[in-house]
Amino acid sequence: MSIKKRYFGDKAFYKMALTVAVPMMIQNGITNFVSLLDNIMVGRVGTEQMSGIAIVNQLLLVFNLAIFGALSGVGIFGAQFFGCNNHKGVRQTFRMKLYIAVGIVVLGILVLLVGGEQLILLYLHGEDNAQALQATLVYGKQYLMVMLVGLAPFAVEEIYATTLRECGETRVPMVAGAVAVLVNLVLNYLLIFGNFGFPKLGVVGAAVATVISRYVQMIVVITWTHTHAKKMLFIVGAYRKLPIPGQLTLNIVKKGTPLLCNEILWAAGMAMLNQCYSLRGLEAVAALNISSTISNLFNVVFMSMGSCISIIVGQLLGAGKMEEAKDTDRKLIVFSVLSCFVLGGLMVALAPLFPRLYNTSDQVKELAVRLLWIAAGCMPIYAFVHASYFTLRSGGKTVITFFFDSVYLWCVNIPLAYVLSRFTGLPMAPLYLCCQLTDLIKCVIGFILVKKGVWLNNIVAGD
């Protein structure tokens, strides 16, 4: 087989892949673009407000990824059930998602209500600017209290949206996301600055806008699903009988628990990494917030390609098409990595422009540009690691993904960041670069695991 045929598909292949991936790219792109605009709006108010929101969003990321991990663990079965036209199986995975999400929402609200202030304080360092640190804490607490109201609609929307995607319907979640971010953007403009007679609420306004947009997004997805029951057969009778077969529940728990633990530990690990970075002061927190928000706008391609791999390859595995799954996966990984070389170059060129939009110090802007350059250079690395992770996950190898992702983070990335941040005087940019380059080792591990084909499994045969 020639290199071209082995690593690159034909027009029909890319049309098929992009049909799944592009709606997710558009949805994530719009969401991240509006997040960027939101971030700029708050950044125009002040550094303390921006930093307070950034810290809280880092904490909320743990909750968001707990939901994502739990639903993804169940979704492995959903995609494979759909691949073999087992709509009853998809319905049962939908019910399982409901049970798990309720537990995570209740636990998340309790933890953030009781320990929110203490968690925010972990990110506030620097004795020479006590007033700014206190202001950041106050803004963070205000933002957090409102955002707690949005945890439930976020979880419900994700239950429906992930199931729709597993059934090949990626357009509706995209439309719902687009409507939500439009609502969020308009309300941010009105409520943060008090335009057109609305109250000037600052960070509280940003939180209110986000919460309302989440309810809108949830309503759109639920309404479409229940009004298109003939197309989405899983929803027919989904609430009529809530029990789930014991064997399926056991299988989901066995496969899904490592994935849930992985996402929680990964999100907690990222929070720990950022806590290490925060030891470089409030300027580092602000610069990292700017850099991360802008990077996320460019990262939508490889992030969406990972989900695309999970869906397409998962359906092929469920249908028992092992060789086709292997060939498709290889070509999708190549496409994702090569795309990120192009996007990384674009990000390098545009990096100096974005921080100028913020009302913050020149030191923060300069540091943000350097962090953006580092993130841009590492983007192809991120793409390969992300694609490898979703390849392993599509075949139900959740224990392997647990070690590949969160265990690696806690055993390699975090100890390195902890030592460098506390026992050296390494500036923020070199510190950040050292921690990001550890993913090169993950690339080697991912390559070996994917090439060996340990993920080529049909996990729903006989269910």
Image (cartoon, rainbow, N blue to C red):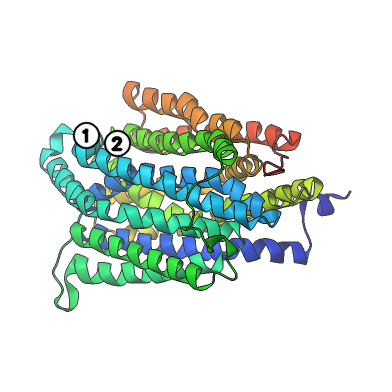
Residue at the (76%, 66%) spot, across then down: 12
For this view, does 332 lie left or right of residue 345? right
User: Which of pointers 1 and 2 lies earlier in the amino acid sequence?
Assistant: 1
Tell me the crowding category of disc 2: few under 14, some 14 to 19, or many 20 or more residues within 10 angstroms, Cα based. many
Residue 345 visible? The answer is no
Mark carried by residue 125: 1
- x%, y% of residue 91? 56, 55
- x%, y% of residue 19? 64, 66
Quarter of the C terminus within the rendering: top right
Using the image as rendered, state which of residue 157 and residue 145 is in the foreground. Answer: 157
Using the image as rendered, state which of residue 42 and residue 358 is in the foreground. Answer: 42
- x%, y% of residue 215? 33, 64
For this view, does 255 lie left or right of residue 196? right
For this view, does 187 lie left or right of residue 78? left
Distance of label 1 from label 2 (alpha carbons) = 7 Å
Q: Regarding mark 1 in the picture, which secondary structure is present there? A: loop
Q: Amino acid at mark 2?
A: Ser
